[in-house]
Image: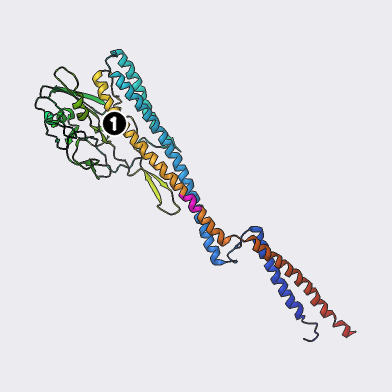
Amino acid sequence: MGMVVKNNMQAVRTLNTLNGNQSALTKSLGRVSSGMKITSAQDDAAGFAISERMRVRIRSLDQANQNTQNDSALMKTAEGAVGNTIELLRTLKEKAINAANDSNTDEDRATIQKEINQYIDQVDDNALVQFNGKYLIDGSKNNAATSTKTILLNQSLSTDAKIGSGLTQLADRVGNSLEILSTDKYQISWVNNGIISSSSGSVSSYALSDLFKAASVGTAEGTSTAAIGTDKFNQAVYTPDKTAGLAIVATTAGILGQVSGFTISILDHDGNVKKAANAALDQFKQYQMAENETQGGNKALNFHIGSEANVAIKVGLSDMRAESLGLKGTDGSRISVTTKDNANASINVIENALTKALDQQTTIGAIESRLDYTSTNLTTSSENVQAAESTIRDADMAKEMTNYTKANVLLQAAQAMLAQANQNSSAVLSLLQ
């Protein structure tokens, strides 16, 4: 190329190289200082979009994990209240058994009744436990699509036992006769809406249906089939092994119509309890609790535990008030232990209430366990997505330092060569002198 002064192409080319080295140095410096090889969409448009979506997912998973922690705290609050209620029920049963003993005077039983009244009131206080302003076990967080009926099931009698079977014909589960005689006497008691009622008489030719009729007073009926009712979702309720079982089913659905206790006692002609007969006959235990239909639709708690829409757990919490547990009536009347017979009837009521409370505690415990597993899964998912995002976006610092050093050296070389190129043009001046 000739010697020119207007266009110094050597300097222009060197300047372009200098600018390119400067740009490379700037990018390398940005990656080293930020620790990321993609700092903007300009660096890698596709990689930037993918990593941004991953970042959104990471934050969503972390929030879902935080949700599970909050939900677990809520369930622990409910569990604590139910656990305290169970402890109260243990004490109530202890007091009722004490009151059923004739070593106590009427004054003693009256004193025990005062204690029981206070414990029952505490059960109601427990049901008002709150978390973040929400009542949990007062029935407001239930998910009953329809009101349910009380079902008291007895599977200690022979599968051949029917509602119309005579008492003298009854046998236990393995076929042994209960040895109930027509000269024996029966005593039955039942509790409806917190009120204890009783009936007694001679066995004579009585059938089970006669006892149920005498006891129900329009509040219960008997059945001896495998399907013994419907649950709160209108699904059929069967006996545990789907074999015939004797059941007492309340005629009226809901808490107001519940039969919270049913006690049968067979006595010989001397008034002694026939223990072998009672061991099988007096086994009508709570199988389904009475629940009121949830007003305003499903009020179950919705635990959102995922990073996407509709990834949630529905949790319905049963009514743990004393009225729902059968310990108190709608008029405020409480189960009574002021007489031996009432105390004896109250024992089964408290046992059924304990079954309800334990069922609720089991449900809460299962949800807590599930939330723990969910939290672990969300933590692992977040870690894995973060690792994947790191491979796309994070810079290899050793590589970037190498590139930085290279760009820095090339920049300095370009600067030196630009100075040299500018010096070459000044050589033309010697020709003009």
Q: Which residue ends up furthest to the left in the rendered image? A: 205
**Badge 1: how crowded within 10 Å, few (<14), some, or many (20+)?**
many
Quadrant into which the C terminus falls: bottom right
- x, y percent for residue 45: 56, 66
- The answer to whether residue 100 is visible is yes
> Which secondary structure dominates the residues rendered in magenta?
helix
Q: Nearer the viewer, residue 196 or 212?
A: 212
Whether residue 217 appears in magenta in the rendering, the answer is no
What is the quadrant of residue 334 in the picture? Answer: top left
Q: Which residue ends up furthest to the right in the rendered image? A: 433
Residue drawn at 20 percent across, 32 percent down: 219
Type of amino acid at the residue the image marks with label 1: Asn
- x, y percent for residue 42: 59, 66
Q: Which residues are magenta?
A: 377-382
Up the image or down, 103 lies above or below 360; here it is above
What is the quadrant of residue 224 in the picture? Answer: top left
Residue drawn at 30 percent across, 22 percent down: 96
- Label 1: which residue? 352
Q: Is residue 12 left or right of residue 158?
A: right
- The answer to whether residue 319 is visible is no
Q: Secondary structure at mark 1?
A: helix
Q: Which residue ends up furthest to the bottom in the rendered image? A: 2
Quadrant into which the N terminus falls: bottom right
- x, y percent for residue 37: 61, 62
Q: Is residue 411 left or right of residue 231?
A: right
Up the image or down, 279 lies above or below 386; here it is above
- x, y percent for residue 210: 13, 29
Up the image or down, 345 lies above or below 429; here it is above
Label tally:
1
The way the protein has been coloured in the rendering is rainbow
